[in-house]
């Protein structure tokens, strides 16, 4: 286990202790070269999972009652420690993910910024949702009791690192940051595709735990291949919530496990979305080619490996559609193939592109540049008609990678029908000119019901970390359509309210005492 | 279907239309006399469920976008209409529940007050949780997009009437009030024990829907016996959330159905709690007998048929325990038996009291007055020791009715161990003197983790409707320990956040436009 810039050792972290797991081991593979990377990481055994959960449970009470200032400083220390990993981190991420340097540096900035945003949120105290409703002994017909409410941490949280954001949605990503902000100890199950990155970040968190004098159980990191580690983690009775970003099959498996526990627990899984892009006639007529060019850039961001990748284009039919296609075709044809995250992801991409390419109702509009190395994705834009799209669920499924299908939609009635028939989405994007506003307005309520974020004249691929962001949406975009995994609202997933009735001042938590300086609602 | 003070017809409501269900029918039974009450209510068929859900779905978009003022007025009109039912309502509730007049009148006041509180909440707009983060085109390294967020209704909600609160947790109870406040159409599955009460209240809501000019699908009421109606309702793909108060077995069945849907949905089930009462040595020494007398009153409230009934007393052993027992014994021995809600509930009570009475490690401390009519519950206080209590899960289970078990606990270590071993609770009550504060303070974090509400020197049976109330708690108290079914926070269960990115003012909802007068966070 790396501390500072020490070399990677192949250990994981059970609390503060580096441990070489005795389970099945793994090595990372550089997807750009196919070469295996050192060191070998020992995989967690059931006993390792058990010890990590026991430590997290032991850490819960001391950690959830740390002061707002101390907890905020802890999150900031993690951010500082990540930056101190410097180029060793960037290079390891690049080697394990095939992602280019600017993207990795940007993602590091996002990760650090996210930790700092949650530190600021913790310090504000607003997330406590404190309420003070003092007694009214003279109320008729019955006296009013003294009631006070605050949020507390739900308990130890299991976080699953995601393959596609080795930093921002992994060991110190949004799930971990929001759970730690809520006062929950975290046990991370590292994604097997980037064990070295996970170990480096895990060391940064472990060092912050130590530097801030916290209970070591606040953080553990489990390494290893396969599903057994995650299943054991979600089954542990001390785990009280789960954060996951990944495949639909993976999310559904965790949901089933969590629901079957003696004490069922919430799973916040972000799983599957095709992020429909709606092209309105006015916008197409005005700037069809430009939208097509912008689309071509968006669909290839990160080799199309974004949860918010634009996978379906619903174009209201008309002459502007050809301009869109021409713009997209020109840009895609000249684009280079990009290395995907893993051999498995690349194989799945090839398989799903094959479904489109071999489909009798689907035409291939353009393919991107051919691969020049292993595991490279060749971008693809397909076309089908509305009836065929509606008739075949395979055409509506997410293809993880730089692939999209354009559907020619005859009219607004059909567009509404398609949206209504589709599953829940993270994002829906509309391209509009002024003339399109009335039609868009009429459609908007249907869009709000289908997606967590509705956006205009852009693509969903950028996910701003903000108090006003929703990175969520109805199933199967997420397992809980009322939640978000990005932005300050993400903390809500890991909190539960507790009410204190007629409690002496000496027993009340600081935030609820008379004269509390923490923001609170006073109920007359 | 009754409108105003018209006689009951045995119909249910599919939207505005009174319908005599073609399924298995039922009649209410007066538990105090055993006599069947007119009229016969036709039971809902699968087709009735389907039509109610289709109407609710059709009502969703128009209803969820009603103005804050209009929606608040609707809730207030329901409250007014309930009061207009006057004594016909009170008498029907008494006949169907065996509950005495003062309790029923009090519950009506609570129900009406709850609707008015949610009207006030709707009008405030705070539940929208609106956030406006305007664009920053000059931000480096990337411009900031314009992001705005508000909550919207999750969709049509299925509400299950509870047996034990025929008004406050039934057709127009907390689940319905909070779902309607959130903008969700509601389909109520009436509790089979009080179809006439349900029909009267249903008529009051239906009349309010009409008077306020709302889509008829905003409210439907399904009648009938058995589990098939509720299962069909929770399985309907248009239903997006479930509110339930009832038995553990019933709640678990709905949770399983909801989790197995193609699109899983949240179930907010309030199920099972024994509401431990902790008696500390100082309080016992100071006023043991008085606490015992107060306990005897609390355990018999509503014939013990409160979710918050004090079912387990954990008394730190010492001389004060005998004073507590003496006080409780005197009051319980002189109490009369009370009619329970249904023959089935009474039979279950007798069965569970029999488990205690026949248990080798349990002593009977006192029984209340003997029954003088059908379905009357004879109160019971039992005693056991800490080891026996821990060893037998049956002694830790909820007994629905005026029954409690006192556990002599040798010391604080054992008390902590018992609390830790117990399941989640709605409430935990502490009886304290000043000398007990240090011990209570040390125990508090464990209590917070086990219960939604921790209260001092009282019993949990009164549940104030307040912004600071939590009527919830970790499983199995509720299916979702992060939620409450009483108080303004209950609205959160039926909301989901939506983010609007770079949306023209003309498309934005009123609450998010520049210059909005709805309370919102402005994000710089």
Image: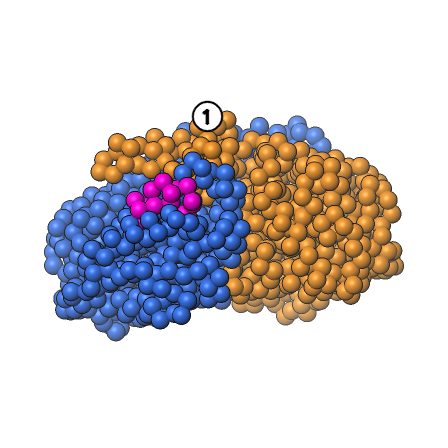
Chain colours: A orange, B blue
Disc 1 crowd rating (10 Å Cα; few below 14, some 14-19, many 20+) is few
Q: Position of residue A394 (x, y in %)?
A: 60, 66
Magenta highlight on residue A284 = no
Q: Main secondary structure of the magenta part?
A: helix
Q: Quadrant of residue B359?
A: bottom left
Residue B428's place in the image compared with B507, above or below, is below
Left or right for B241, reference B504: left
The quarter of the rendered structure image containing the N terminus of chain B is bottom left
Left or right for B144, reference B299: right
Residue A280's place in the image compared with B405, above or below, is above
Identify which residue is drawn at 71% across, 41% down: A209
Residue corresponding to mark 1: A515
Magenta highlight on residue B289 = yes
Q: Nearer the viewer, residue A473 or A210?
A: A210
Q: Quadrant of residue A5?
A: top right
User: Can residue B377 be seen by looking at this rendering?
Assistant: yes
Q: Nearer the viewer, residue A446 or B313?
A: B313
Identify which residue is drawn at 43% across, 51% down: B317
**Residue placed farthest to the front in the image?**
B319
User: Can residue A435 be seen by looking at this rendering?
Assistant: no
Q: Quadrant of residue A282?
A: top right
Identify which residue is drawn at 50% across, 50% down: B411
Identify which residue is drawn at 73% across, 37% down: A211
Magenta range: B275-292
Q: Position of residue A266 (x, y in %)?
A: 53, 55
Label 1 sits on a secondary structure element that is loop
The quarter of the rendered structure image containing the C terminus of chain B is top right
Q: Position of residue B181 (x, y in %)?
A: 35, 45
Q: Nearer the viewer, residue A417 or A270?
A: A270
Q: How many marks?
A: 1
Q: Position of residue B325 (x, y in %)?
A: 32, 53
Chain for disc number 1: A
């Amino acid at each position: 286990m790396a501390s500072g810039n020490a070399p990677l050792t192949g250990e994981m972290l059970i609390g503060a202790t580096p441990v070489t797991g005795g389970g099945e081991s793994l090595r990372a593979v550089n997807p750009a070269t196919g070469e295996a990377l050192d060191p070998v990481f020992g995989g967690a055994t059931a006993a390792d999972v058990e010890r990590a959960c026991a430590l997290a449970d032991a850490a819960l009470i001391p950690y959830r009652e740390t002061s707002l200032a101390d907890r905020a400083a802890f999150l900031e220390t993690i951010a500082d420690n990540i930056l101190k990993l410097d180029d060793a981190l960037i290079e390891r991420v690049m080697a394990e993910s095939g992602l280019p340097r600017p993207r990795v540096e940007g993602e590091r900035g996002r990760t650090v910024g996210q930790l700092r945003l949650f530190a600021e949120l913790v310090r504000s105290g607003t997330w406590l949702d404190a309420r003070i409703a003092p007694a009214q002994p003279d109320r008729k017909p019955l006296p009013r009791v003294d009631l006070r409410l605050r949020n507390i941490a739900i308990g130890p949280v299991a976080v699953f690192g995601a393959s596609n954001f080795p930093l921002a949605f992994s060991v110190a990503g949004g799930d971990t940051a929001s759970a730690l902000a809520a006062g929950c100890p975290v046990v991370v199950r590292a994604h097997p595709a980037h064990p070295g990155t996970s170990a480096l970040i895990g060391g940064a968190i472990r060092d912050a735990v130590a530097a801030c004098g916290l209970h070591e159980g606040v953080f553990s990191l489990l390494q290893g291949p396969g599903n057994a580690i995650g299943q054991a983690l979600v089954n542990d009775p001390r785990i009280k919530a789960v954060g996951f970003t990944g495949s639909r099959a993976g999310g559904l498996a965790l949901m089933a496990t969590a629901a079957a526990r003696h004490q069922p627990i919430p799973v916040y899984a972000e799983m599957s979305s095709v992020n429909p892009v709606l092209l309105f006639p006015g916008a197409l007529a005005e700037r069809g080619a430009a939208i097509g060019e912008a689309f071509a850039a968006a669909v290839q961001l990160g080799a199309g490996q974004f949860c918010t990748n634009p996978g379906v284009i619903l174009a209201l039919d008309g002459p502007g559609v050809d301009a869109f296609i021409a713009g997209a075709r020109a840009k895609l044809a000249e684009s280079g193939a990009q290395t995907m995250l893993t051999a498995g992801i690349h194989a799945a991409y090839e398989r799903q592109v094959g479904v489109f390419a071999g489909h009798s109702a689907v035409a291939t509009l353009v393919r991107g540049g051919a691969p020049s190395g292993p595991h490279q994705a060749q971008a693809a834009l397909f076309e089908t008609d509305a009836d065929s799209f509606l008739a075949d669920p395979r055409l509506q499924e997410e293809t993880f990678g730089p692939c999209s299908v354009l559907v020619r939609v005859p009219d607004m009635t059909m567009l509404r029908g398609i949206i209504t028939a589709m599953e829940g989405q993270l994002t829906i994007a509309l391209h509009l000119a002024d003339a399109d506003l009335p039609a868009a307005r009429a459609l908007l309520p249907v869009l709000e019901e289908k997606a967590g974020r509705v956006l205009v004249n852009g693509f969903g691929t950028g996910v701003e970390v903000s108090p006003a962001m929703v990175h969520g949406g109805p199933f199967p975009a997420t397992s809980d359509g009322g939640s978000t995994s990005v932005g300050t609202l993400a903390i809500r997933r890991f909190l539960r309210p507790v009410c204190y009735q007629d409690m002496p001042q000496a027993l009340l938590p600081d935030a609820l005492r008379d004269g509390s300086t923490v923001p609170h609602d006073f109920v007359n």
